[in-house]
Amino acid sequence: MSNEYRHVLVAVDLTKDSHKVLERAIPIARRNHAKLSIIHTLEPLGFAYGGDIPMDLTSIQDQLDDHAKQRLAEIADPCDVPREDQHVVVGMPDTEIHRFAKEYDVDLIVVGSHGRHGFALLLGSTSTGVLHGAQCDVLAVRVGKDGETDE
Ligand code: AMP
């Protein structure tokens, strides 16, 4: 029985690819008797609109946050990931994933990657950002449209 990892962090974009990424991470966490956390990051509305909109975006941000939590639970609950290990945070995905990983001693981050053509497109922008600067192992699970995956 392997005990290589103690805390596995699964990063999901809440698309249907998320199921595949989570399903790949779960047996790894189980084999290692590791804790499994799942994270989704929301882009801050203020960042997207750069202060151009003269209105308080707090309530819209809260609604987006609630919606993301709901969607994350739909993905994570059936896999028995406890709610306290389901995280929605506001910020840039790679920055927030690195921050979480450092703070909670994550030793494996699992992300999805699209099998696009060419080296630059091999990993999506988020997975590339997560890989660069990560202080732990990163597993890129190949995801894509049906029929385009490795399996
Ligand atoms: P992308 O680079 O956008 O093609 O996304 C590839 C992978 O990065 C996804 O399968 C997720 O694992 C991760 N990812 C993308 N966006 C987010 C996000 N907002 N929050 C957490 N993880 C994300």
Image (spheres, grey):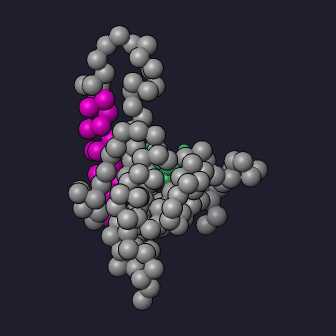
Task: Please give the name of the residue rendered at 26% of the width and 32% of the height, measured from the top-left corner.
Answer: 62
Residue 101 lies, in percent from the top left, at: 41, 58
For residue 49, side relative to residue 128 (left or right): left
| Residue in the foreground of this view, choosing between 59 and 115 | 59
Q: In this view, does 133 lie above or below 30?
A: above
**Residue 112 visible from this viewpoint:** no
How many labels, in total? 0
The part of the image, by quadrant, that contains residue 53 is top left
**Can residue 69 be seen from the camera position used here?**
yes
Pinpoint residue 17: horizontal percent, then vertical percent. 49, 52
Residue 61 lies in what quarter of the image? top left
Q: Could you tell me which residue is drawn at 23 percent across and 57 percent down? A: 84
Locate the N terminus by quadrant.
bottom left
Give coordinates of residue 7: x percent, y percent: 38, 69
Q: Does the magenta stretch include residue 128?
A: no
Q: Nearer the viewer, residue 85 or 117?
A: 85
At a point 45% along the width and 80% down the height, the residue shown is 4
The correct choice, above or below, for 110 with respect to 4 in the image is above
The overriding secondary structure of the stretch rendered in magenta is helix
In the picture, the quarter occupied by the C terminus is bottom right
- Residue 141: quarter of image: bottom right
View extreme (bottom): residue = 1
Q: Position of residue 49 (x, y in %)?
A: 44, 20
State which region is magenta. 61-79
- Would residue 135 appear left or right of 76 to someone viewing this image? right
Q: Residue at x 32, y 33 (%)?
A: 64
Question: Foreground residue, 134 or 109?
Answer: 134
Left or right position of 23 against 150: left
Residue extending furthest toward the top: 54
Task: Say whether residue 62 is magenta.
Answer: yes
